């Protein structure tokens, strides 16, 4: 799919790779389903995601409707009660960025 310098909302199905700029938000809605590798400044996951989410410099928020099997790189993380998340979590600190 390439790189985007804007926020991206997924309301349908996405398969592949999405690269968003460091300040951009990836949002997967309750009706959305995403499979692949996703890089963004921040992510808000309400729907289904499988693959990898890389928000090394930002926050990843899983809402109560999230259904995910993912590897997650994050600086900040929140998981709401009710979320169904199977994840390999990796917190990235400022020191890791060099």
Image: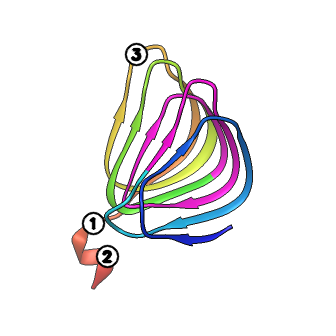
Secondary structure under badge 1? loop
Q: Position of residue 50 (x, y in %)?
A: 68, 43
- Mark 3 or 1: the one toward you: 3
Residue 85 included in the magenta stretch of the image: no
Say whether marks 2 and 1 touch (CB < 8 Å).
Answer: yes
- Kindly report the distance in space between the C-alpha atoms of the residues bearing marks 3 and 2: 30 Å
Q: In percent of the image, x 27 and y 85: which residue is there?
A: 98
Q: In percent of the image, x 43 and y 25: which residue is there?
A: 63
Secondary structure under badge 3? loop
**Left or right side of 86 for 96:** left
Q: Which residue is mark 1?
A: 93
Q: In percent of the image, x 47 and y 14: which residue is there?
A: 82
- Kindly report the distance in space between the C-alpha atoms of the residues bearing marks 3 and 1: 25 Å
Q: Residue furthest left?
A: 94
Secondary structure under badge 2? helix
Q: In percent of the image, x 41 and y 70: which residue is there?
A: 21
Tell which of 66 and 8 is nearer to you: 8
Q: Which residue is mark 3?
A: 81
Q: Which residue is mark 2?
A: 96
- Please state the extent of the stretch shown in magenta in the rendering: 26-51
Dot 3, crowdedness within 10 Å: few (<14), some or many (≥20)?
few
Sequence-first disc among 3 and 2: 3
Q: Is residue 1 above or below residue 62?
A: below
């Amino acid at each position: 799919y390439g790189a985007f310098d804007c926020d991206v909302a997924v309301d349908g199905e996405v398969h592949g790779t999405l690269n968003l700029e460091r300040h951009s938000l990836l949002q997967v809605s309750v009706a959305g389903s995403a499979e692949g590798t996703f890089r963004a400044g921040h992510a808000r996951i309400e729907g289904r995601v499988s693959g990898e989410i890389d928000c090394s410099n930002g926050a990843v928020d899983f809402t109560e409707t999230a259904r995910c099997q993912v590897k997650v790189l994050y600086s900040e993380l929140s998981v709401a009660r009710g979320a169904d998340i199977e994840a390999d979590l990796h917190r990235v600190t400022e020191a890791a960025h060099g």
